[in-house]
Image (cartoon, helix red, strand yellow):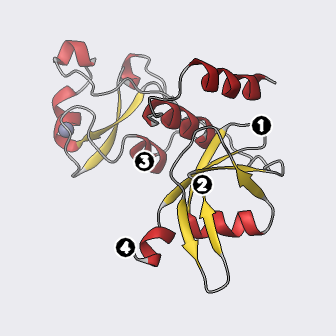
Amino acid sequence: MVIVNQVLEQSVVVFSKNYLPISKVNVRRAVQLLIAGKAEALDLVQETSWFVRSPSIVLAVPAYIRLTVASVERIWKVPSVNRREVLRRDNHTCQYCGSRKHLTLDHVLPVSRGGLHTWDNVVTACERCNQRKSDRTPLEAGMPLYTKPKAPMHPTVAFAEHFWRSESFPPEIGGTSKHNAETNISG
Ligand SMILES: [Zn+2]
């Protein structure tokens, strides 16, 4: 038997009113949304539900819920290129050697050679790599980058991308069900 608190911490994927995956919440929050009438079960797939029991009711919490009210888009703009944001994007990891210590910012194409202070030209680098690379490009220095730098994505878009990449739908979801889901999304 699963302990109540464990169930309450399981995650439920929240879809917007327009059927876009927008976030994950725990069962506790999902129950609040369902009871308040702000969300409903999303029957995209026949998923196992989490059962939450209280003395008076048994509530089946689906693995996917859909908001019944339009979600307020949080205002978000691409953050400016600064140390805090670049380190966060790069997961506090040197993009040349993977070190997580003595981190600095490095201009991929050095400023002295016309490199700009932009999201696609600034990466996290440890002091050692920064000094070793000096005023060379990664190619000249023989120091390939772990990832190609780019501006952070809108959090909602990033979540949706991660959701569609990571979600494994059950094998019984064949042409028909999938077609229905697509109809919902486009309709
Ligand atoms: Zn390094």
User: In front of the other: label 4 or label 2?
Assistant: 4
The location of residue 44, given as percent across then percent down, is 63, 38
Task: Give the spatial CA distance, label 1 vs label 2.
Answer: 18 Å
The location of residue 144, given as percent across then percent down, is 22, 21
Name the residue type under label 1.
Answer: Asn
Residue at label 2?
62
Query: Taking the image as drawn, is residue 79 in sight?
Result: no
The residue shown at (42%, 47%) is 88
**Pick the front one: 43 or 166:** 43
Name the residue type under label 4.
Answer: Met
Q: Secondary structure at mark 3?
A: helix
Dot label at residue 1: 4
Locate residue 175: give its quadrant: top right
**Pick the front one: 172 or 119:** 172
Residue at label 3?
88
Residue at label 1?
18
Disc with the residue nearer the chain's start (3 vs 1): 1
Which quadrant does ligand 1 occupy? top left
Disc with the residue nearer the chain's start (1 vs 2): 1
The location of residue 77, given as percent across then percent down, is 68, 40
Q: Secondary structure at mark 2?
A: loop
